[in-house]
Amino acid sequence: MCDDAQLQSWLEKLCAPESELTPLARHKILSRLMLCIARSPRLWRDSHQDYAMALNRTLVWVRKDICKFDPGDGSVSEALLRWVNGTLKRRVQDLRGARGLGAEDDRTDRDYRRIAKLGLGPPVELDKPVIDSQGHTTTQAPLTADPKSGRYTLLEQWIERLQAQQYQRIGQQVRAYLESDPHGVLRACQSRKYPDCHCQGLVQGLYLSQPPLTQRAIATQLKANEQTVYTHWRDKCLPLLQIIALRHDPQVRNYLQVHSDRDFGQGQLEGTEHGSCLELSQRLLLSEVLSPLRAIAKELRVNETDLVAHWQTQCLPHLKRHRL
């Protein structure tokens, strides 16, 4: 079970009157909370055939009503498990009396069907009895597991698969963009001294070619100074790749579309009228075609180095904070 300090921190973030949590941040905290509950040795367990169903529905209820939980003055973890166990026991007792689905169960089943549309299948399917290689009846994955066993629980597998699919989709989209460079942004970001040393070529050589090339090998091919290649990659290409990755992240895009300058705090670039972090982030991440920082700096009539520093030290940390 997670410690009291961690649980208290999560509860405060989830239930603050004016919580600034993004939907993704709230989802991640709730997922971690569910894992703590599912792996706790204090979680009540029962041999009833529908225990897994009861626990699944109890966890759905916890996600919905967590802010109604009152830990009192004692241990937060102990109070939380008493709260969860009380509902879980009642659900199992109800199942003993009459097996069937009520209105609340129907809502839960609809949630599972929505999950199934993602290609994951409802969580309870992992608890269906199967015959192992020795002829024993077992399950594909336990809903809860002995915390010392090291086995993944059903809930952990479910969450991990959701996250892995999202990251895989983003990764595929970013790779396709890097390979095609549809608007020539990567190729246009070139070294002044060596025009053939541009970000598209460096990305192709360092990451997309098989086997990948070293910076020294690329410098030799370009007949360029190795330090120049390294500096261009570090100072120009890596920040550009970071922006490209963020442009393909739906959570970041959604966040920028619904928040205001006030949410970004002190994020105005000194000496500019339209250099706030929100405006800069929207131009970099929401525009149909990516505008390089150099072009934006020229339009705002500010030094490119100052604009890059503003983006990396003021704006980017804020986006990262709300992305996690």
Image (spheres, helix red, strand yellow):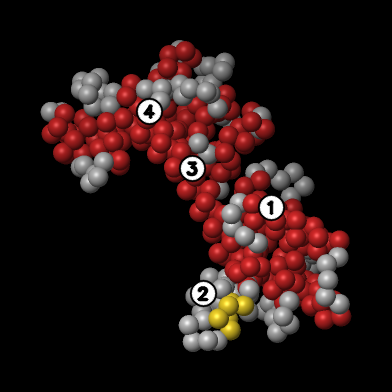
Identify the mark nearer the N-term, 4 or 3: 3
Instruction: Left or right? Give the position of 70 relative to 196.
Output: right
Query: Who's the residue at 83% across and 61% down the image?
Result: 104
Q: Which disc is residue 170 wearing?
A: 3
Asked if marks 3 and 1 touch (Cβ < 8 Å), the reply is no
Q: CA distance from mark 3 to mark 2?
A: 28 Å
Mark 1 or mark 4: whose residue is earlier in sequence = 1
SS for callout 2: loop
Q: Residue 99, percent across and down? A: 83, 75
Q: Amino acid at mark 4?
A: Asp
The residue that label 2 is drawn on is: 151
Q: Eyeballing the image, is 36 above or below 10?
A: below
Mark 3 or mark 2, which has the lower sequence index?
A: 2
Kindly identify which residue carries mark 4: 181
Q: Quadrant of residue 56?
A: bottom right
Q: Earlier in the sequence, mark 3 or mark 1?
A: 1
Amino acid on which the number 3 mark rests in the picture: Ile
Q: Earlier in the sequence, mark 1 or mark 2?
A: 1
Q: Residues within 10 Å of mark 3 (few under 14, many from 20)?
A: some
Pinpoint residue 282: horizontal percent, then vertical percent.
56, 26
Left or right, residue 314 beside residue 60: left
Q: Label 1, label 2: how many angstroms apart (C-alpha)?
A: 27 Å
Q: Can see residue 306?
A: no
User: Quarter-wise, where is residue 62 in the image?
Assistant: bottom right
Q: Nearer the viewer, residue 107 or 80?
A: 107
- What's the residue type where badge 1 is placed? Arg
Badge 1 is on which residue?
114
